[in-house]
């Protein structure tokens, strides 16, 4: 049996080729939009592509299944499970639970494994000349190494469906079946570490069923309610482009093929396009960008997160210019092509030539850790933690507030405050992307922390965690409910709007934590009397409590364990 795993680091995505060397037939699973690499690799192996399939309707990249099958005349086999709303809109051969097809002497058995999506399939693979038992399973976005697929992406397409909890329960049922598989089966997942399709994916490219039973949190959890709550809590915000990918991949309207090499722009062409408002994407590293860049450009460094951030920021219907070396222009254009960003108007390779032609460069203000500590002490600045909520438990800068970068990209509302906003993340990468984006949209009082939390700690400065000794009261959910019900305290939910809309404590008031930098919000909170603060798990609400203490609030408390603990104790809840 021929087997090859292909990895795309900018999407943390795996495709697979399985071939029968006796008959020359080959199957491609989960191909990307640019299909030539699969054709070449299979030809070089002396095989021919006879079957093409995918595990589910993808949200994080444009699928190449239709284009590849048409290019080589292969059978296109796709899921017909999942209900009427999740049927492919183009011609294919349908697959259902228990179906079997042969690729030469290789037996492929279809398992229906909903949870990440309604139509999700996994594939048991048996090399029949070696025996009658399967040796591996391709799990797509069902089971990863160390994690499972997130169940909330359906809400991107049908936000009023309330489907996340139902999909979480279906995932629990699918995992119950997964536990019955033989321990020796190799597990080949659809994504690795860094993918936004899960929360804590491992870096290993493969695993076994037995190893996942021991180490994967989702397979160790046997209580359905606790599993669903944990699965839905503090998932990273899905990038903005995911919804478009999901719809395009279902309809098949965005065909694959090959990305075109962008043209090199003259400085006159660059000036003209810039004058028309075409977005400039500077792919240099964060330090070079901060030191000097073409005014109005956005820094999306050429690295593993390039594709994800481009999908967050760029509009698929609008043109853009790449500011990158000629040696990288084609690869970057291909990475963008894979998520439907086809509007590359060209590339410009030499920022220094811009200066030589008499133009000015802009700079992105950055602070080192000591400078930030000084301006925080004098209340001249606000430290804004742009990491995902689950990252806060490892520690945050004292007095900071949390505002995940994705929400700031979506909202882009400049708060009413005289203080400078200093964004920070783990190493300073996300914060520079965000700061450059907001400055390109007219935000004039933002900067970033050079080298992020790693620089803060290297300077010998301390971090706080939700468990750090604090000057406000920490109370458990039962006591919080008693005070909320009997004492008339105001319960302030500081989660993001989507989380609050999905479900909240009846009678609670909603103020997202990122709005706390707005002075009018602080004035409103001051008029609400004693406050109880709640979030998903207690991390963000702890930050909110500390922030309010700095603003002069005295009578407040934080709800330990947040809404997860609230629901686990079956306290009143409104969906």
Image: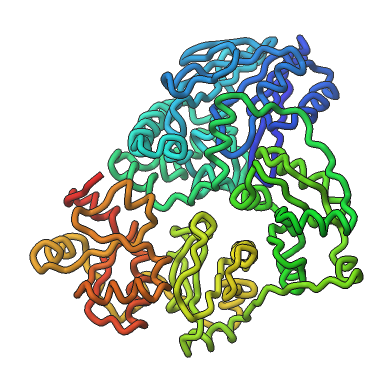
Residue 156 percent coordinates (x, y) = 46, 39
Observer-nearest of 100 and 232: 232
Which quadrant of the figure has residue 292?
Answer: bottom right
Q: Residue furthest left?
A: 486
Which quadrant of the figure has residue 75?
Answer: top right
Q: Is residue 96 above or below residue 187?
A: above
Residue 289 relative to residue 150: left or right = right
Q: Which residue is at a point 64% across and 49% down the rendered structure image?
A: 314
Q: Is residue 38 above or below residue 244?
A: above
Observer-nearest of 54 and 41: 54
Residue 448 percent coordinates (x, y) = 60, 73
- Quadrant in the picture for the N terminus: top right
Task: Tally the numbered discs.
Answer: 0
Observer-nearest of 160 and 188: 160
Residue 6 percent coordinates (x, y) = 71, 35
Residue 172 relative to residue 91: left or right = left
- Quadrant in the picture for the C terminus: top left
Residue 409 relative to residue 556: left or right = right
Q: Which residue is at a point 78% across and 72% down the rendered structure image?
A: 361
Q: Which residue is at a point 88% across and 59% down the rendered structure image?
A: 267
């Amino acid at each position: 049996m021929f087997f090859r795993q292909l990895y795309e680091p900018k999407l943390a995505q795996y495709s697979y080729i399985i071939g029968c060397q006796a008959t020359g037939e080959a199957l491609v699973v989960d191909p990307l939009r640019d299909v030539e690499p699969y054709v070449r690799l299979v030809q070089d192996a002396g095989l021919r592509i006879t079957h093409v399939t995918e595990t589910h309707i993808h949200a994080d990249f444009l699928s190449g299944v239709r284009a590849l099958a048409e290019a080589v005349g292969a059978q296109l086999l796709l899921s017909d499970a999942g209900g009427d709303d999740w049927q492919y809109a183009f011609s294919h051969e349908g697959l259902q639970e228990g179906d079997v097809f042969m690729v030469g002497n290789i037996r492929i058995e279809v398992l229906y494994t909903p949870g990440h999506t309604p139509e999700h399939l996994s594939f048991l693979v048996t090399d029949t000349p070696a025996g009658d038992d399967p040796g591996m399973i391709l799990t797509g976005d069902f089971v990863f190494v160390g994690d499972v697929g997130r169940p909330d992406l359906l809400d991107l397409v049908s936000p009023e469906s309330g489907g996340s909890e139902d999909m979480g329960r279906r995932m629990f049922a699918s995992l119950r079946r997964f536990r019955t598989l033989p321990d020796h089966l190799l597990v080949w997942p659809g994504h690795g570490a860094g993918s936004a399709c899960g929360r804590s994916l491992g870096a290993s490219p493969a695993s076994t069923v037995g190893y996942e039973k021991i180490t994967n949190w989702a397979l160790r959890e046997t209580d359905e309610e606790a599993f669903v709550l944990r699965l839905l809590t503090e998932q990273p915000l899905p990038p903005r482009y995911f919804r478009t990918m999901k719809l395009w991949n279902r309809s098949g309207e965005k065909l694959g093929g090959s990305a075109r090499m962008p043209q090199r722009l003259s400085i006159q062409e660059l000036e003209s396009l810039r004058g028309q408002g075409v977005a400039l994407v500077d792919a240099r590293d964060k330090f070079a960008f901060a030191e000097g860049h073409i005014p109005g450009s956005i820094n999306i460094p050429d690295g593993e997160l390039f594709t994800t951030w481009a999908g967050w920021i760029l509009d698929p219907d609008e043109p853009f210019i790449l500011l990158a070396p000629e040696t990288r222009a084609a690869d970057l254009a291909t990475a963008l092509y894979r998520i439907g960003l086809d509007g590359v108007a060209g590339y410009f390779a030499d920022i220094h030539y811009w200066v030589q032609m008499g133009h000015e460069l802009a700079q992105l203000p950055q602070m080192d850790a000591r400078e930030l500590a000084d301006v925080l002490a004098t209340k001249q600045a606000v430290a804004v933690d742009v990491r995902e909520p689950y990252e806060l438990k490892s520690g945050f800068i004292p007095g900071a507030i949390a505002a995940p970068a994705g929400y700031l990209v979506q909202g882009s509302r400049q708060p009413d405050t005289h203080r400078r906003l200093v964004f920070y993340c783990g190493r300073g990468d996300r914060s520079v992307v965000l700061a450059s984006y907001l400055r390109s949209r007219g935000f004039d009082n933002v900067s970033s922390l050079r080298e992020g939390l790693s620089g803060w700690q290297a300077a010998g400065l301390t971090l706080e965690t939700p468990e750090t000794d604090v000057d406000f009261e920490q109370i458990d959910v039962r006591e919080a409910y008693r005070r909320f019900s009997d004492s008339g305290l105001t319960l302030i939910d500081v989660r993001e709007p989507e989380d609050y809309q999905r479900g909240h404590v009846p009678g609670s008031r909603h103020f997202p934590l990122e709005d706390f930098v707005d002075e009018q919000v602080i004035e409103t909170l001051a008029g609400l009397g004693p406050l109880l603060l709640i979030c998903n798990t207690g991390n963000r609400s702890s930050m909110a409590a500390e922030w309010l203490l700095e603003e002069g609030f005295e009578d407040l408390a934080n709800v330990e364990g947040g809404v997860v603990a609230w629901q686990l104790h079956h306290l009143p809840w409104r969906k």
